[in-house]
Image (tube, helix red, strand yellow):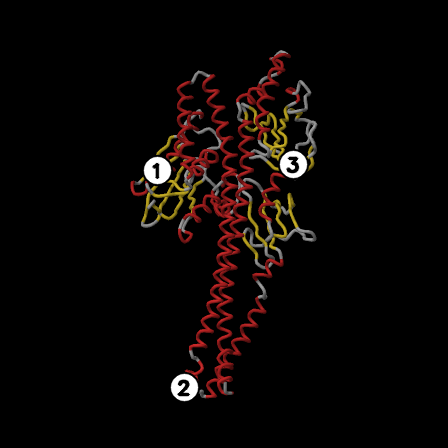
Amino acid sequence: MSFRKKLIALTLSSALLPLILLILYYQIASLQQDWLKSLSYSVDQTALLLGNEWKSIQVTAEAFCENPIVQGFLSTSPSQQTKNDQIDEYGTLNRLVLPYYKNDTIYALRVFIAEDKFYLSEQITFFPLEGQPLPAAPSVSGSVSAPYLQRYKNRAAEEVVSYVKPIPAKNSVNKMAGALVIDVRAAALKESLDSLKGDEFSYVGLIRQDGETLLSLCDDGCSPPLPPESGTGYEPENRVFLRRIENTDWNLICQLKSNVRGLLFPLSANELWIGLTLLLFTALSAGFIFSRLAVPIGSLIELFQPSHKAGASSMLKDIRSSVEGAEQVLAERQRQIILRQKMQLSLLQAQLNPHFLYNILDRINWLIRAGRNDSASEMILSTARYYRLALSKGNDEISVRDDLELALAFLKIHNIRAEHPFQIHYILEEEAADCLVPKMTIQPIVENCVRHGFPTDHPSAQISMDIYTEEDQLFISVTDNGVGLEPSKIPEILHTHTSGAGFGLFSVKQRLQLFSENGLGDIQIETEKDKYTTVTLSLSAKRRL
């Protein structure tokens, strides 16, 4: 090859090199974004799993505190009972506690009662309320302790986290008749953290809002990272993910390993821009040299003979094959992560449903004993309909008509047990009835109305639902005439994992966004204090093909 042809080939190679490197950079950047989305999804699902696990503990506590046997025990004066009556009563209560130990997550269940009821000095299930500090200060919604070592009966000591729930007096919700303490095995919470840690994270932990560390898993030599100043999300500078845990005041914080970051970020931002600037300068210089040489067109044609074209084509095929292989590996990894999270959530649902079913069966038992057989029969039919729709043959997406019927079955179960039943009104547009929604979309909203819209008995409580479509969107509006919300709290409820009045709304919004195309899923809240609250869901109007 002549000197002139070699010079031309060198000049063209210098001009093409920045273009090839730029294409590779954008391919790597695309893979990086997909990889971060996959990790973010894993962190979100673990936060949801931990929140739901703690919800099951709260459901257990509420079922125990609201049990008529417990209420009757605490409201009966010992002076009205014989010694045998007292012993029989203790035996009944102990038998009531035993089923809770079938949950492997629970290490112990303790009931602290007033001194005048503590007549057997048993200190196995029951303990005196006075003179013994509780693991955490009791609050109406329940409180959570820091981890500590607990030894119970003759079992080995274990690290536990305690949930403390006050038991209100029968005739006065402002007076505490006792306290329930559920000791949860810290190892059960660590299992969820361990499943997330894997090879990508050097640190995974739970911290309180005030910064106190509850539980953590970390590599040797690592220290807890600082939470992002921007709140929940991902902070690239320190490689930190932060998510709030629903139903608690905890945060899930995760930090990527530095060597993992190096595989995807071989250059810092400054180094990358300097390199691209030098490559651009090289390309411009090559173009200038090429124009000054005034290479004949014939020489260019001679240079790009079929043999050269075949070599360039082979190089591009190799690049494309490498990129496609990396994409396939990432897609398979993301599929495995999603499958693992679905299996965990399915297991969690199997753990949660028995608590709800126990409350219903307990209520049916008392209806039958009270001679209200018609009400008991009606509750059994409503429960069967509720579970038939909740299971829905394993489908994750069901029609709006079925999801509405599931919410109505939930309300009917509640109305049977309520002293003043809710008045329920709904309008279902015909075109909206066959649209698909994630299963149990409406039920958490109406449950919020029942639990938080009416904290006290309300003789004229109403819940109204309006479901309709506009263009390619589906709208579900739920209104109650309860106590309303402070407007200043709405942004916090919609954008963070919170307990109290915002229970579940953040998770519902995430499900709607995952379900809807282009992230169209959203929740809007309109409220006026002591008058009403309206929650409106919007999502893509999908129909089964």
**Location of residue 266 by image quarter:** bottom right
Q: Residues within 10 Å of mark 1 (few under 14, many from 20)?
A: some
* Residue at (49, 43) in percent of width and height: 342
Q: Residues within 10 Å of mark 2 (few under 14, many from 20)?
A: few
Q: Residue 236: in sight, yes or no?
A: yes
Residue flagged by tag 2: what amino acid is it? Answer: Gly
Q: Residues within 10 Å of mark 3 (few under 14, many from 20)?
A: many
The residue tagged 1 is 401
Whole-percent x, y for residue 509 in the image: 45, 46
**Nearer the observer, 366 or 9:** 9
Residue flagged by tag 1: what amino acid is it? Answer: Arg
Whole-percent x, y for residue 510 in the image: 46, 47
Q: Residue 533: in sight, yes or no?
A: no
* Residue at (49, 65) in percent of width and height: 26
The residue tagged 3 is 160
The residue tagged 2 is 298
Q: Earlier in the sequence, mark 3 or mark 1?
A: 3
